[in-house]
Amino acid sequence: MTFEAFLRHLAFAGVLAIVSAACVRLMIAWPILDHPDARKAHLHPTPKGGGVGIVVAFLVGMAVLFQVAAFARLADTQFLGVIAAAAAIALVALLDDVRDFRFVVKLAAQAGAALVAVASGIVLDRLSMPGLGVVNLGVVGIALTLFWIVACTNAVNFMDGLDGLVGGSVFLACAILSLVAAQEGGLFIYACALILAGGLAGFIPFNLHPARIFMGDVGSQFLGFVMAVLAIASARFDLQQLSFLIVPLLLFGLLFDTGFTLLRRAAMAERVSAPHRSHLYQMAQRSGVSVRRIALMHWGFVCFHGALVALFLRLSPAAKPLVVVPAILVQLIWLAYVARRVRVAGLSWRSG
């Protein structure tokens, strides 16, 4: 790819940012209001559904891509169904923003979209295992793919509770992923990540603290689903499919917080699907850490993980999985910091 081509692609992403921003402005003008309650961080009714801008920009970008890029048309058998599923999950999530569906309804929509992705051929079918080499996963690969897509969709959704946190984190992850994909020859993933980054760039200025609008489930579930699919697609960067780890590594801050919170709540015999305010980022905010600082911390996590991805690409297949160790250590330090602040502030980890 030439530098001139890269500049044209950036300009196109800039156009998509304008499309996204225009849609966000419309959602502010005709708002779906998110009213404050005991489990939310905002104090005044605030519009939500700003993720519509991200979704529209992405769909417009993909439509243009399929018209002008031959490599995109070659991938249509796998990705057209997935893009349709992403649009469907966004539509259900938008209705949820309006009507507030039960969690089981959201989960059913996510599972349906994940099944479409698997049926379209987006499956992790082999993986390099320490001591075993490359193992064909078979049916286990299908189950792992379904679990990953639903888990990632929910993780991004659950973490969208503070201004700028998810939008900024996923924007940085997309920017890094697009560069990695270009380097590895994954042009379709490069284009998808750049298009998604363009949509996020149009939304983020409206979502920085104090936010004028939230992305809502329509944005967070859509982002989680698309990033999950891009992770599976990225597995084809190498024969061992260890490059599947790139996207989970970039999103590790969001995934760690969600995983820790679910395990902690289950251990405390709480209903894990019930609304709450006990994620690590929420406990940090309740203990007195500013919203801006928490968002910046998570953006920093993504940048650190981006450096780990650069290291990952240079390691031997046997050493590649070890790159998650520094990411885990950083999250454990963050956990210890938040736990100390919670203890000093006299807060309870129980929901309520």
Image (cartoon, grey):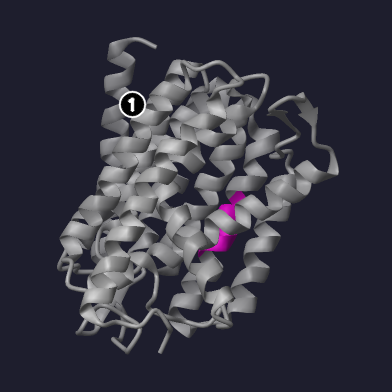
Q: Which residue is mark 1?
A: 9
Q: Position of residue 324 (x, y in %)?
A: 48, 37
Magenta stretch in the rendered image: 84-90
User: Label 1 sits on what residue type?
Assistant: His
Whether residue 28 is visible, yes or no, is no
Judging depth in this view, the residue of 27 and 231 nearest the camera is 231
Q: Residue at x 23, y 61 (%)?
A: 207
Q: Is residue 88 magenta?
A: yes
Q: Main secondary structure of the magenta part?
A: helix
Q: Is the residue 53 above or below the residue 321 in the image?
A: below
Judging depth in this view, the residue of 48 and 246 nearest the camera is 246
Left or right side of 292 for 50: right
Left or right side of 244 for 33: left
Q: Position of residue 276 (x, y in %)?
A: 43, 81
Q: Position of residue 28 (x, y in %)?
A: 24, 71
Q: Is the residue 288 above or below the residue 86 in the image?
A: below
Left or right side of 125 for 66: left
**Quarter-wise, where is residue 160 in the image?**
bottom left
The quarter of the rendered structure image containing the C terminus is bottom left
Helix, strand or loop status at disc 1: helix
Q: How many marks?
A: 1
Q: Residue at x 28, y 75 (%)?
A: 343
Q: Residue at x 48, y 26 (%)?
A: 68
Name the residue at the top extreme: 2
Q: Residue at x 40, y 37 (%)?
A: 326
Whether residue 211 is visible, yes or no, is yes
Left or right side of 257 for 127: right
Q: Position of residue 66 (x, y in %)?
A: 53, 32
Q: Is residue 25 magenta?
A: no
Q: Is the residue 230 above or below the residue 279 in the image?
A: above
